Image: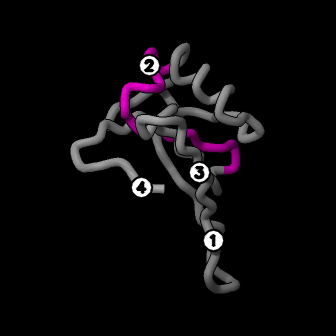
Amino acid sequence: MIGPGTGVRVYLACGVTDMRKGIAGLTALAETELRQRPANGAVFAFRGRRGDRIKLLYWDGQGFAFTTRYWVRLEPGFDRGAYVWNSSERRRFL
């Protein structure tokens, strides 16, 4: 799989997303909540309730590429890591 090129738009779905959703559910969220066509070449990022994982979705020209990233604690004793972004609004463009 080849990643998106330079100059790609990234949309954050601010707030909490159900991490059980797959490609179909996340493309529906991109259309309804973010008001964007999922096949427009942008990357869509969705954050789970605990903040320890995000799901990334983008159209690569032939189909959707979908990946999940987990925050990993490297040493015991450190605070639990989390992906943090503003949840006061539903969408944000980077």
CB contact under 8 Å: marks 1 and 4: no
Residue occupying the far front of the picture: 62
The label shown at residue 67 is: 3
Return the residue at label 1.
72
**Which numbered disc flags the more N-terminal residue, 1 or 4?**
4
Could you tell whether 81 is left or right of 88 in the image? right
Q: Which mark is residue 37?
A: 2
Against 41, residue 80 (above or below) is below
Q: Amino acid at mark 4?
A: Ile
**Residue at left 77%, top 39%?**
20
> Mark 1 or mark 3, which is nearer to you?
3
Which sits earlier in the primary sequence, circle 2 or circle 3? 2
Q: Which residues are magenta?
A: 34-50
Residue 43 magenta-highlighted: yes
**Pointers 4 and 3 in contact (C-beta within 8 Å):** no
Q: Residue furthest left?
A: 7
Q: Which residue is mark 4?
A: 2
